[in-house]
């Protein structure tokens, strides 16, 4: 949604009906995760992607029909056959795509959802993905709920799950009984948690930090650069950063601990014990998903000794990625930033960080995100 929001919000304000196609479930090596979105306007303009090109042409045709009829549709796409023109996924996976009409009548809460996304406020959209209630939706924020899925018990159960998913930023299919009963499968509800971008804090206003800030923005982070030296921490030197702060790093981090969660990346590039040791002493006791520190092997060993002296334990020190980055042979600031970004991605996904050519099995790993079972995949393939 965030990727296409600017374009589709204009369509909505103009009173135009458009179609929103969203990946709601995946199995095996699917090219895009649940939440990936493609939008098609009434006059045929398409933005976004649901598969990276495999099935977009068919989704586009379905979207045009949905615009005409105003009726939502769920389409399942599986492994393509030997016909290169078949509508399927050559990667061997399977995805389900919800294609729904959006206009002021069909989705009256759209403007409030768009406003929340643009303001960086968390909001979840829960949409019925099966049966007679297909397309009914709830919009959930930490403060209020609007809409209905057609049953008070179902609404209550979905709201409870949606609030929990907002806290983790997760998006997935959830299944319920018709009145919200748990461990039932009569109703599938797609809950999309639209949370603010994850935070990246870059400490140390050096040339490497400028490159890390650029790649952080490219990866979708809200990037803050912090350094105690005002002559270096300037907007002119870090134009891509969302914020440039002049403060002692550990003091600044202590003031924003409420913004640090499991999605946060902390990149310590200060190269100076008086900055990085107090900072890491605090950072390693946060929930940050990635904590990396730049420096040589000797610097790393000295840093560990200082942190042990400060009282950090082995489990806390084990969280530190130092020297930061993957071994790519990087030398320039830009190459180093890519190696750091690669390590952040690998740590986030628990991937091996080995060349794909040296691995086997699925490229897009992970377990099924929701309701698609092995039997469902085989059935879908047999039906082709």
Image (cartoon, rainbow, N blue to C red):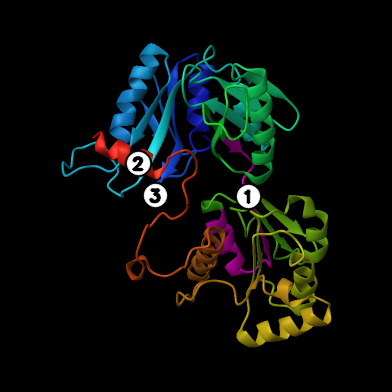
Say which element carries label 3: loop
Indicate whether residue 44 is drawn in magenta: no
Numbered circle sitting on residue 28: 3
Residue where numbered disc 2 is placed: 377
Q: Give me the residue at 52% from left, 14% from top.
A: 106
State if disc 2 and disc 1 touch (CB < 8 Å). Answer: no
Say which element carries label 2: helix
Q: Which residues are magenta?
A: 192-216
* Quarter in which the C terminus is drawn: top left
Residue neighbourhood size for the residue with mark 1, other residues' Cα within 10 Å, grouped as few (<14), some (14–19), many (≥20): some
Q: CA distance from mark 1 to mark 2?
A: 33 Å
Which of pointers 3 and 1 indicates the residue nearer the eye? Answer: 3
Residue where numbered disc 1 is placed: 198
Which of pointers 3 and 2 indicates the residue nearer the eye? Answer: 2
Which of pointers 1 and 2 indicates the residue nearer the eye? Answer: 2
Residue neighbourhood size for the residue with mark 2, other residues' Cα within 10 Å, grouped as few (<14), some (14–19), many (≥20): many
């Amino acid at each position: 949604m965030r990727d296409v929001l600017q374009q589709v919000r204009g369509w909505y304000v103009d009173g135009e009906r458009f179609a929103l196609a969203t990946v709601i479930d995946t199995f095996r090596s699917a090219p895009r995760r649940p939440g990936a979105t493609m939008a098609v306007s009434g006059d045929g303009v398409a933005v976004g992607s649901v598969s990276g090109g495999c099935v977009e042409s068919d989704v586009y045709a379905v979207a045009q029909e949905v615009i005409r009829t105003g009726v939502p549709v769920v389409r399942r796409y599986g492994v393509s056959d030997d016909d290169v023109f078949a509508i399927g996924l050559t990667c061997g996976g399977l995805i389900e795509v919800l294609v729904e009409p959006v206009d002021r009548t069909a989705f009256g809460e759209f403007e409030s959802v768009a406003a929340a996304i643009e303001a960086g406020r968390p909001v979840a959209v829960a949409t019925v993905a099966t049966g007679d209630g297909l397309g009914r939706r709830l919009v959930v924020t930490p403060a209020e709920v609007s809409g209905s899925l057609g049953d008070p018990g179902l609404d209550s159960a979905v709201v409870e799950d949606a609030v929990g998913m907002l806290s983790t930023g997760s998006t997935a299919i959830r299944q319920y009984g018709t009145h919200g009963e748990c461990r039932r499968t009569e109703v599938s509800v797609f809950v999309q948690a639209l949370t603010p971008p994850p935070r990246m804090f870059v400490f140390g206003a050096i040339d490497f930090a400028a490159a890390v800030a650029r790649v952080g923005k490219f990866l979708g982070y809200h990037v803050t650069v912090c350094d105690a030296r005002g002559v270096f921490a300037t907007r002119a030197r870090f134009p891509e950063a969302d914020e440039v702060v002049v403060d002692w790093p550990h003091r600044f981090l202590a003031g924003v601990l409420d913004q640090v969660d499991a999605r946060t990346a902390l990149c310590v590039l200060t190269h100076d014990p008086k900055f990085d040791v107090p900072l890491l002493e605090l950072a390693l006791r946060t929930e940050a998903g990635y904590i990396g520190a730049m420096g040589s092997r000797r610097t790393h060993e000295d840093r560990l000794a200082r942190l042990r002296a400060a009282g950090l334990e082995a489990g806390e020190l084990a969280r530190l990625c130092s020297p930061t980055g993957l071994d790519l042979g990087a030398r320039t600031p830009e190459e180093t930033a890519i190696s750091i970004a690669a390590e952040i991605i690998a740590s986030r996904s628990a991937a091996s960080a080995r060349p794909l050519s040296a691995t086997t099995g699925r490229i897009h790993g992970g377990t099924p995100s929701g309701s698609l079972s092995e039997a469902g995949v085989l059935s879908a393939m047999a039906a082709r």
